[in-house]
Amino acid sequence: MKFNNHEFHNQNIELDNNEFNECKFTNCKILYFGFGPVKLGQNSFKDCHWEFTGNAGNTLAFLAHIYQGGAQELVDGLFNSIRQGVIPSTVKH
């Protein structure tokens, strides 16, 4: 579903398979399960709680484990790419 210029207050918002552009989120729980694509453009978030569960939570746990397991350079490189707006599908380390 696509939301443009919408305001959300005190709601649970599922990101999966949705697009949000120029929306305002206040005191919301932002949920990402990792089951579908998400598009976010020029939104604002105030006093929101983000929750990553399902596949998204598993991916974050995996990154934390490999970071602690000796692959700090790999994880740091991934986050540097993300900061630049590049989402690599493969990484050589």
Image: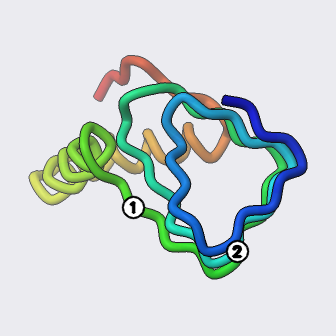
Determine whether 89 is above or below 64 in the image: above
Numbered label attached to residue 89: none
Residue ID at (25%, 43%):
54
Q: Give x and y (percent) for residue 75.
A: 34, 46
Q: Which three-letter amino acid code belongs to the residue tagged 1?
A: Glu
Q: Can you say which quadrant of the picture contains the C terminus?
A: top left
Q: Which three-letter amino acid code belongs to the residue tagged 2?
A: Thr
Q: CA distance from mark 2 to mark 1?
A: 15 Å
Badge 2: how crowded within 10 Å, few (<14), some, or many (20+)?
A: some
Mark 2 vs mark 1, foreground winner is 2
Question: What residue is disc 1 on?
Answer: 51
Q: Give x and y (percent) for residue 31.
A: 45, 54
Please tell me in which quadrant of the rendered image residue 24 appears. Answer: bottom right
Determine whether 62 is above or below 17 in the image: below
Residue ID at (83%, 53%):
6
Q: Is residue 87 left or right of residue 46?
A: left
Task: Decide which of 30, 91 is in the foreground and name it.
Answer: 30
Q: Is residue 9 left or right of residue 57?
A: right
Determine whether 49 is above or below 88 in the image: below
Question: What residue is disc 2 on?
Answer: 26
Comes first in the chain, label 2 or label 1: 2
Residue ID at (16%, 47%):
66
**Label 2 with label 1: CB-CB less than 8 Å:** no
Q: Disc 1 on helix, strand or loop?
A: strand
Q: Give x and y (percent) for residue 28.
A: 58, 70
Residue extending furthest toward the top: 90
Q: Is residue 60 left or right of residue 76?
A: left
Task: Decide which of 74, 52 is in the foreground and name it.
Answer: 52
